[in-house]
Image: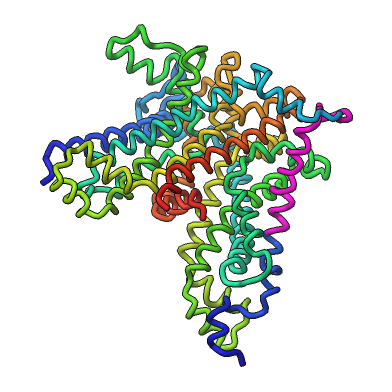
Amino acid sequence: MISRTERTTGYAILTLFAVISLTPVLGILSTAFGKQGALGTGFSLPEGGLHWSNFADAWTRGHFGTYLGNSVLVAAVVVLATALLATLAGYAFGVMDFPFATPLFYLFVIGLTLPQEALVVPLYFDLRYVELTDTYWALILPQTAQSLAFGVFWMRAYFRGSARSVIEAARMDGASTWTTLWRVLVPMGRPAITTMIVITFMWTWNEFLMALVMVSEEGLRTVPLGLAFFQGQHASETSLLAAASVLIALPVVIVYVALQRRFIEGMLTGAVKE
Amino acid sequence: MKSPLRSSRRAPGEPRAIGYLYILPALAVYAAFLLYPFGQSVWLSLLHWDGLNAATWAGLDNYGDLFTDPALRAPFVHALVLLIFYAALPVAIGLLLAAVMSRFRVRGMTFFRTVLFLPQVLAMVVVGVTWRSILAPDGMLNDVLNLVGLDSLSRAWLGDENWALPAVGVVGTWVETGLCMVLFLAGAQRIPRELYEAARIDGAGAVREFFTVTLPGLRAEIAVALTLTIVAGLRNFDLIYITTSGGPGNATSVPAYEVYHRAFETNQVGSAAAVGVALTVVIFVLTVTVSRLVEGRRS
């Protein structure tokens, strides 16, 4: 039925774009293991063995050890706070019926399309006024708020879809709303919660604009901010830049490869509005 | 005891007002660090303020400037040009692939999906650093051009007045194409086989088959793809900051970059806020248009 040419053309296109997707990634990976001081800003091949020292140099000389620590701290707090608050709110929006539930929910949905660029300017002046710029809070609080738009939207959909009979049964057993949530629905909802966590983690980890505006002290830089400044100062140290890029991308890529279905599902449904 | 009928009609979970307690923590953080700042942005956009001295009332001046000041008009024009690269091209390429592959099961889909979607999960800062070295004067692109004897075409892509914008756009195409391919391939696999057989029996060629079966079947996926890619194309601060900082001249300035540049580098806070609010409006209008045009037609 289907001609061989069609099939071949299809796979040829797929393969071509897979190669296009991978080439820059492999280029940066090979440069990261390349020889330091190799001339030029382009990619290089690792000559004379893999140079692991680039990573050690990025870690110490580029201070990426410190930056990674900051990123881990900020991402952990944002992810935990978002998961907790979004679960609570999503639960209420999903299974409870109270006045103004729908308009309040739409208030959260607006946040899915509101660009950061429309928030960052007043946020900077507000946080500077209460002397929170150049603290972890200036990174954590705004990013939690932005993640909540997705988190609440996502968790409401999960609670909506969760079986009514389960909630009824829990209530018949005399479980309070609180117990039903933590003993029944949260354990059952592990896949949905995992998706929310990995997406929030990726956004927070990769965030750049907020960090650039809120933090001027070097000791508070997150990894994307660290890389931007490192590029500004050492544009010609290509192998160090590449090694630092790999260090930044690696945590997200590892989680992505392990949980790619959750990633793709989460990122694609963010755009589907009701 | 409540009758089972009543509890099944209403959402379970007893005292209803307790719902407010559950949403309160999220709403407090969300209101303080997202809704309130957005309101302030709207307010700031009506002022002339340098961030230091007392602000003066500007009315709609900052918005008027978006239309009259060439330095403010350019970023919006650039943003629209970039949408060709971020949204139109990836969707077109994705549809082409779906057209070819819609009628058979794709093998190795997990591998292709993982690889094609990979650019989506990389930090834009990393993408920017990577592509800056590809597009550098001694970068990979020029190496390849020299290798195949097209030396005359090689140039400093990001430093060239005419080529910088398309060069940044190509990076967007690289990031977004995989997403469209993954979406459309998955969607095309869900179109019932019988529709294709029916089209074949009616004597439809490949082209008619695409327009009568594949394209309508992918409507929902196209709407999602356009929404995601348009939003990504308009919120591209990171990439511009890393690769060109809006240059050379203002050849690659975009609204997202202009907000930062004006607020924190040239002390035009009111104008920066107006650009941010206008960007929000553009995003809203485009995403609503997409869902009306592409999705709404069905009902």
Total labels drawn: 0
Which residue is painted at 73% across and 38% down in the image? B41
Tell me which segment is drawn in magenta: B27-55
Which residue is painted at 67% across and 59% down in the image? B26
Instruction: Identify the residue at the far right of this view.
Output: B54
Q: Is residue B180 above or below residue A82?
A: above
Which SS does the magenta portion mostly show?
A: helix
- Left or right, residue A53 beside residue A3: right
Q: Is residue B53 magenta?
A: yes
Q: Is residue A79 above or below residue B168?
A: below
Q: Position of residue B252 (x, y in %)?
A: 55, 21
* Picture quadrant where residue B276 is located: top right
Instruction: Identify the residue at the far bottom of this view.
Output: B1
Which residue is painted at 19% across and 35% down in the image? A9
Q: In the image shown, does A47 or A266 lie closer to the viewer?
A: A266
Q: In the image shown, does B109 or A211 lie closer to the viewer?
A: B109
Taking the image as drawn, is residue A63 in sight?
Answer: no
Which residue is painted at 50% across and 54% down in the image? A198
Q: Position of residue B269 (x, y in %)?
A: 76, 29
Taking the image as drawn, is residue B240 in sight?
Answer: yes
* Picture quadrant where residue B245 is located: top right
